Image (cartoon, coloured by chain):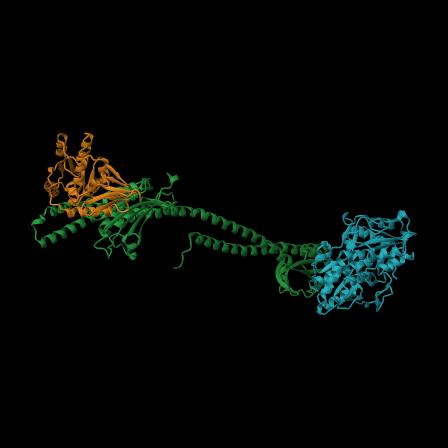
Amino acid sequence: MKCGTLATLTAAIVLSVATSAMAVEGARAFFPAVEQERGRLVVHGATDVEAMEPLIRDFQSTATDVAIDYTDYVTNDLYRDADAACRKQENFGDILLSSSVDQLVKLANDGCALAHSSAETEDLPDWANWREEVYGFTFEPSVMVYHKDFVPPEDVPHSHGELTDLLRFKPDYYRGRIGTYDLRQSGIGYLLAFLDAQQASTTYGRLLESLSRVEAVLRCCNNAVLSEIDSGNVFIGYNILGSYAYAAALRNPKLRIVLPRDYTLILSRGVLIPKGATRPDLAGRFLDYLLSDRGQEVARRKAFFFSRTGPLPDNVDGPPKLIESGIGRPIRIGPALLAAQDQLQRSTFIDDWTRLLRGSAGGKTP
Amino acid sequence: MRREPSLFSRLVVRVALVLCGGATLLAVAAWYYARAAADDAYDRLLLGAAIQITANMTVDHGNLAVALPTSAFELLGLAARDRIFYRVIGPDLKTLTGYEDLQTDLDLTSARSAPVFLSARYRDVPVRVVVAARALSDPSFSGWSYVVLAQTTEARRALAGELTSRAMILVGIMSVLALAGTVLAIRYSLLPVSALGAALRARDPQDLTPVDVDVPRELRPFMASINHFMGRLDERVTLLQRFIADAAHQIRTPLTALSAQVDMLEEDEMDEVGKRHLGRVRKRVGQLARLTNQLLSHAMVIHRSDSVRFKPVDLSDIARKAFRAAVPITVDPDIVISFEAPPGPIVVLGDAVSLREAIANIIDNSLRHGTVSHLAVRVVGGDGRARVEVEDDGPGIPRSEWESVTARFVTSKTGEGSMGLGFAIAAEVASAHRGAIGFQEKGEHGFTVIFDLPAQVEGAR
Amino acid sequence: MRILLVEDTRDVGEAISRRLEKVGHTVDWQTDGQAAADILDFTDYDLVILDVMLPGLDGFEILRHLRTNRKTTPVLVLTARSEIEDRVGALDLGADDYLVKPFDFRELEARVRVLLRRRAGDPTNLIECGDLVLDRNSRSVRVGNREVQLKRREITLLEVMATRPGRVFGKDELLDHLFGFDDGANQNAIELYIGRLRKKIEGSRVRIVTIRGLGYQLVADDAA
């Protein structure tokens, strides 16, 4: 999903740059080969080109004859176009990147993916690999972000339950000051909410009730919520992807990040080589690079900040060992995500959610 | 002629064939059962998932609703690599959710009594399909709804493959062990055959006593046949020898009498013709006498070679005695007859009587058929051999006949009359003593017959 | 000489008797073994000729009986028995010689002569002259390891000359030694025997030299 710029695009030849918070479909960036171009890799990504740029640049330093044509999509659009191309057996890019891994799983389930395996893919944990077709290449906890100036230390929630209780005890103070995704607009928002409901349905129900009571602010996307916090309109953001949150915190030190200590969903951004790829070889090389130690290191430092193996970034409040403690719950890339992708399920879930958050409390939308 | 394969290879090849056939059958069976087992295992998952989905069907305000449980997909996700297709069908047979093109040839109503499994293809891949039905009854809504749940078969095939290959490894190991065991068992079982063979090989060719080797029951008829045959052969040989000896003896007495009568004829009173006839009769009687003696002699050496234990004896001494016995006192005085032996004894392992008989026959033969004016008998030792050489200045025997004169009753065509059994006796004795009869052509010396034996080794005494 | 013949076959007994009597021997012929044994108990003979297969007592029994009585009378055994060990047995029991039936009657006569001579005279067995050794017992002359068979008269001739080597013997003198004064032997016979002897001692350093007009001389070439 693409909601806005994550970082300033500096060096690339930008054909079209998304500047608005709203998704602009078809934003393209072209990265020419460092040397004589011998191959061109077409990447379709539902991930900001700014986040991907350091990775692309570093990849090109190892593959100097490869040019990369990057097109930015919103997750739902990426899925829709990829699905259509698959049905018609047409070409749609050489490699697809998306934070909505459930959509990539659906594509793979429908037979739209090419398998790829290599030394790099071997080392991946099971939850980040399905059928050697869909790989998770990032490690992005779903976090809570708060503004230090407006949230006193004793109010800082460290778990879903604490957030619920806070909103119950101080509803007036936080009324209209809690921000989260609007599920109707955000695929990743829906996925996180759906998985929240799966993880702890009671806790989730109570949290939803509290959010409704304090008339939570609903925004399309991570950056929209983060900018509301940045400006002080919203005090606490819920279910924000750690990478966006950390980028925002780097810009504004008053923004603080908390990883819930009861459980923290961890999203792994997915990558898939579509069946119609013209250069599956280059796609495989890029995929291997993304999964390699080098690619992971660049991602940790410049793009996504969290990593599967490294420590938590500085100034992040959370359990030190996310996976080992059992608090971190990686979203398993696998057929279980198909349940989230069921159209009936999705519409029912979103309808219920909307009815609860909108109908009774009439939460604000931009 | 095609070589008959050995018992061992016959058995091994046949057992190996049976094992191969068995292994193939087992492999097919293993594959079949593994497939069935894998299908059974994964069908349960599929059914479990379908039941979970039907269980989550609800009627909400007159509408059918279904919340697909994640757990159902997690259950199917146990087959980690398999893709999942599903379709929920309402009572109006319209697709409620899922893959609308997931069709089956099945009449959905048949799933009402129990879930139905079938194998099919969907999106060009083989899938296993379960159709489950649920009756919904609500005041506002009632009817049957269905879940069609399909799963690709990768995990099933992988499991079936793994089960099959493990079974095959076991079958393979068992087959190899069985074959190895069979090889050992056959080898062991055939040991008595080789033992019997070795015992027969090790036997003295003249030993016709029954073979006494412990053999398994299966070989006893075979051995009994051998022994029966040997017994008969022994009987025949004994009978023949006895017959020869008896016949020789029976002839002797009248022959001596005949010879006596001839001797008493008064030569002086005969005319020339009469004297000539008498000379011929005398000569023939002499031949007959000699042949008779040789027959007895032959029977004797054959008998002794079977029955007498060899002892160390001095060949010089034996040769000297044979020399004295063989050279008649009445021999033509113009013939120079000499005997030569080294001063010390020349020891051979043998039967003195047979050896003397053999040497005497050679000398006798030479005197009658060879010697003109010289006969020399020499005993020579050295190089581990002991030899008696009988040299005469006669015409000798042509090289082409050397081999045949040692056979019985062979007449040298160039010589006069029958050589009789002389050389046959000598050859028989020589071979019984692991020696041989040789000849040396006339050259610097006269024609020489060589009776050649291995000498007794000093240390072997 | 007095000879006991024990032989039950008429034809054979008759032939032997006649042949031996013809050369001047007295032959007592018995056909029964027991009778022969009885006779031997109280009569001495110069030679016994014994058939093995006999009615009454067999030849071996008689021989054993004779030898246990310490009689040294020479015995010539005649055998026709099919038992193969006969010949060995005969010698072991103390027979002096044996003949296997059927035999040559001249050979029998020759053997009888030898046995009787061995009995009568008891001459020095070995006479040496140069590298020649004359063995009267085995009727042979030895040069080194080689022994050459000699006839009775050849032995006598060689013996006469060898006892006095170097001496010249006239033909008449030698004729006397060989044949006595009877027989119609002439000097040609001496030349014949000398010729035979020369052949039989070939290879020796001892030579028989002819001295024309005088006779013969034995020369031992010790110097050669």
- Determine if residue A362 is in view: no
> Is residue C21 something that shows in the picture?
yes
Q: Given the current orientation, which residue lies at the most extreme left position?
A: B269
Q: Which chain is green?
A: B
Q: Nearer the viewer, residue A226 or A38?
A: A38
Q: In terms of image quadrants, where is residue B340?
A: top left
Left or right, residue A67 beside residue B142 = right
Q: Position of residue A61 (x, y in %)?
A: 79, 62
| Residue B134 place in picture, x, y as percent | 67, 58
x and y, in percent, of residue C205 in the image: 28, 44
Q: Quadrant of residue A64?
A: bottom right
Q: Nearer the viewer, residue A110 or B318?
A: B318
The quadrant of the picture occupied by the N terminus of chain B is bottom left
Residue C154: quadrant of the picture: top left
Residue sitting at 24 percent across and 38 percent down? C127
| Of the pair A356 and C180, the residue shown nearer to us | C180
Which residue is at the far front?
C213
- Chain assigned orange: C
Q: From the top left corner, tell me how far across and down residue B6 is, in percent.
A: 42, 53
Q: How many numbered marks are there?
A: 0
Q: Is residue A300 above or below residue C148?
A: below
Left or right: where B183 falls relative to B433 = right
* The C terminus of chain B sits in image quarter: top left
Chain painted cyan:
A
